[in-house]
Amino acid sequence: MKKILVIGAGAWGTALANLLAKNSNEVFLNANKSKILDEINHKSSNEQFLPGIKLSQKIFAVSNFVTDADFVFIVTPSAISAKIFQEIAQTKFKKNCIFVICSKGLESKTNNLLSDSFEKITKCKNYAVLSGPNFAAEVANEVPSITTIAMKNKKLASAIINLLNNNHFQAFYFKDPRTVEICGVVKNVMAIGCGIVDGLDLGVNAKAALVMKGISEIQLLCKKIKASTDVVNAAGFGDIFLTCSSQKSRNNSLGVLLAQEKEREDGKTYEGISSAASIVSLGKKLKVKLDLCEGINQILTRKYSAEQIKEIISKAILS
């Protein structure tokens, strides 16, 4: 049994905590709302984020960081990643503690990859990146699911994989965290684009072309930062397929709303909006032309008619 701290009690953080606890680990789930803390500890549920799911009684919700944890899973929005990394840096964790970054996006102020930001702020190199085609509710409902653990140190990555694997969830090793992170950002933007294609009823030819264009832009960015261009893995093509093919994806559903000239749903966080702006800024910094990401970011920055959106997205796909 390992002692694990999961930081972030949203849908994905709670689903991961539940998976880890059911795999016979001692799991502490860090939450910042007393209502959620009480509900997890007294009712073994988190109805706000995982409605209808009975959580393992081996999960203990806490408001602080458990400093003697063997592993720490960071599952907070990328927008507050630097703040969380600072808090980790100021906390005296065990020397051999392994950190797992489960957030997707770029650090909001610097547009740095989260792994680069984590290492710079914490001075810690014992970290991996977890990313894959994982809808939290489906993982919580124990449907067959896969994910990627990306880390340079394969031995340490295997220790993380052993925590996660069971008969319905399998994690696979990949050597380059930076590739995984680029995929995790761009796929959010691609998902908005695919939602736009669906909303405009442009057909599957256009969607296939958009996906291929997005993959080529991922590879351009990876090549520029000297990361692996291999996207045939759970965090690459697997996650792209998930978010681009299903309107369960918030970003995909946002694309549909944009194409149909409807308002965004109140209270919903669409990470693809910040992802688009961040990846375009990164592309300019690296001097990489990202026609698709730039086109989708353009659509997100002001209100366009369906006909104008069709023109922008068609040009981006075919450029």
Image (cartoon, grey):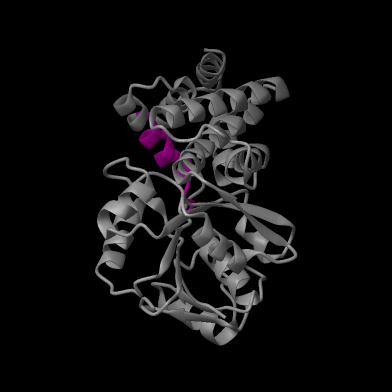
User: What kind of secondary structure does the magenta stretch mostly adopt?
Assistant: helix
Please, is residue 260 above or below residue 98 in the view? above
- Residue 128's spot in the image, x, y percent? 46, 55
Q: Is residue 16 left or right of residue 73?
A: right
Was residue 3 drawn as part of the magenta stretch in this picture?
no
Please, is residue 180 above or below residue 210 in the view? below
Pick whichever, 291 or 311, lies toward us: 291
x 44%, y 42%: residue = 178
Pick whichever, 11 or 158, lies toward us: 158
Visible in this render: residue 8? yes
> Can you say which quadrant of the picture contains the N terminus?
bottom right
Q: Is residue 51 left or right of residue 221?
A: right
Was residue 275 drawn as part of the magenta stretch in this picture?
yes
Q: Is residue 88 left or right of residue 263?
A: left
x 31%, y 66%: residue = 88
Please count the marks in the image: 0
Name which quarter of the figure residue 278 lies in.
top left
Visible in this render: residue 303? no
- Residue 51's spot in the image, x, y percent? 63, 68
Please, is residue 104 above or below residue 317 in the view? below
Pick whichever, 23 or 38, lies toward us: 23
- Residue 144's spot in the image, x, y percent? 74, 57
Looking at the rendering, the stretch of residues picked out in magenta corresponds to: 267-280
Q: Which residue is most to the bottom?
A: 42
- Residue 77's spot in the image, x, y percent? 42, 55
Name which quarter of the figure residue 80 lies in.
bottom left
